[in-house]
Structures are given as structure tokens and as C-alpha cells.
Amino acid sequence: MQVDKKSNASSHAYNAQIHTNAKAHANTQINANTNLSTHSTQTSTKSSHAPHTGTLSLLELGCGNGRDALFFAKNKIQTTAIDQVADEISYLAKHCATTTKGVANPHFIAGDFTNLSAIFDRGGADSAFSSTKDDALTTQRENVLDEKSGLQHHERGGRTQKFIDKASGKLPDLSLSPRFDCIYSRFTLHSITHTQQEILLSQIPHFLTPSGIVAIEARGKKNSLYQQGEPVEGEANAFIHDSHYRRFVDFESLCEVLESQLNLTIHFAKEDRGFAPFNGEDDYFFRVVGIARNERERERE
């Protein structure tokens, strides 16, 4: 199966929006009064989260060719990007990442983003790459989950970097953040089943900082491709069309889940045109940005 292509212009605009939202939320109080289009609830919230004092971190679910991950990294966000295509991840890790304080940015992982616990809690990634402190052009990289040795290390120019072995069930401390300021999914949620979506969403709170952001863009049922192609047996609103699997996400139901089950305040939510124009076409997609509510905010509700 193939996956959807992304529009460069709209992707960069969305990335800039997420980058701006992350910066603003990390350093100022949120006072949102957002018209949520078909998701009609309006939100007016003052957040009491403390200002963010370090490098922002972002986890991308399904990074594809790495374009979005590289955008965030270039904007000085420590980015971890997951994709199931191991060859693509290997290429990106070797040729696209730079190093900051000995840590690759973006940090690329080959694995199933629908099961974050398997990757981060139990070391279940198929491969993960890190780097020495050398310049990016001369950096040597190794698969730190290599089965051949209990402890991986490599040296260059007198510098040594050691990694925790796979048997310990942990990935390198220098490379991965256990919690992220933003979890980002663009054009990936509609590529998984509803069951996989439920598993993924149930795990997100465990990997999100107390004031973190969840940002999602995907195809909903207003999209022109909805109901085109062969229905997927046993999977509602899913079709195979031109060799593409697409499950058209129920926008309003997703917003309700993000609010009620993930304890997010919906900061922006809209299903409309203008989000992903591509090759002269401008179809319907939806975008949702939710911000985690801390315990004090939940107690006041």
C-alpha cells in the first residue's frame, strides 16, 4: 500500500503554526476563544502552566521522508521522528540529522508509532540511531539496538559515546526524551485502523508533558475521496482506492475523545479546505490542536 503525499507549502504553514503554538504555550498563558467550526464548543481557558525553561521536544508519528521533522529541528526543537519504513529511517539518520551536544536532531526511529509503549518503555524499536559529538559531515552512526553485542560503543577523534544495551529494555538516555512537549501527526492517523488509533491515543498522555500539545491533521469524512474505492471489510469508513488505504476519521468524535479521555483542552479544531492544497487541488482536511490540562485545571472543572 502507498501513503498520501503531503503538500510542501501547506506542511510548512502547519509546521510554523505548531512551532508558534508550542513557543507561545511554553512561555505564556493560553487565553483561547476558538471557533471550532463543526465541533461547536468554544474554549476560553487561562492556563496556569509554569513557563518552559529548556529546549522544546517534539515526537512525530510517521515521519515519511523526514521533511516535517527537519523543519522542526531547524527551528531548534529537539525532534524524535518514528516511521515503520526502516530503510527510509536509516537513510535519514545517516544523511539528514545534525548533532547538538552529541545528540542527533532529528532523532529517527524505525518502529510502529501506534504502539509507543513498545518503543519507549520496552526498547521495542526495530532500529534507533545516535551519533558522536563530531561534526555532522564526519559523524559515524551505528544501530544502537544491534543484537551482536551487549553494549554498543564507537570512537572517533578521541571521543567515545556508550549506549545502553537492548537487554536492559531502554534506549539511550542521550537520545530519547520520555515525555514530549508536542506529539505531532500529519497525514498519518487516517493510515491506521480505528483499533490502532484507540491504542495510540490511550498511550499519548503517558508520553506528553503536563502542558504538552497534541497536533493532528488527517482526512475526515468531508474529504472528496470518502467512500471511493473498495470498502475494507470490518473497518468502518475505510477504503482502498488507487492502491491507497485510507480510513476517514470522524472529526467530531476524535475531538470528543481528545477532550474526555486525553484531558486536552481543544485550542484549535476545524475541518475545511485550505489546509493541504496539492497539485492545484484543495480538498477538505481537518486540523486539531489540543493542550494538556494539568491536575489543578481538571479539579476546577
Image (cartoon, rainbow, N blue to C red):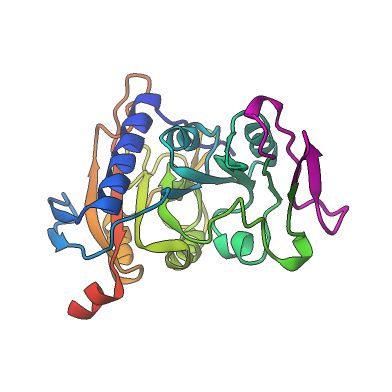
The foreground one among 5 and 93 is 93
Q: Is 238 on the left or on the right of 276, as rendered?
A: right
Q: Residue furthest top?
A: 280
Magenta-highlighted residues: 132-160
Q: Is residue 156 magenta?
A: yes
Q: Residue furthest right?
A: 148
Residue sitting at x 36%, y 30%: 12
The image shows residue 64 at horizontal and vertical percentages of 54, 37
Q: Residue furthest bottom?
A: 299
Residue sitting at x 80%, y 40%: 155
Locate the N terminus and report the quarter of the image it occupies: top right
From this viewpoint, is residue 287 visible? Answer: no
From this viewpoint, is residue 24 visible? Answer: yes
Locate the C terminus and report the quarter of the image it occupies: bottom left
Q: Main secondary structure of the magenta part?
A: loop
Q: Is residue 181 above or below residue 278?
A: below
Q: Is residue 90 magenta?
A: no
The image shows residue 111 at horizontal and vertical percentages of 63, 51
The image shows residue 120 at horizontal and vertical percentages of 60, 61
Q: Is 82 on the left or on the right of 212, as rendered?
A: right
Residue sitting at x 59%, y 33%: 97
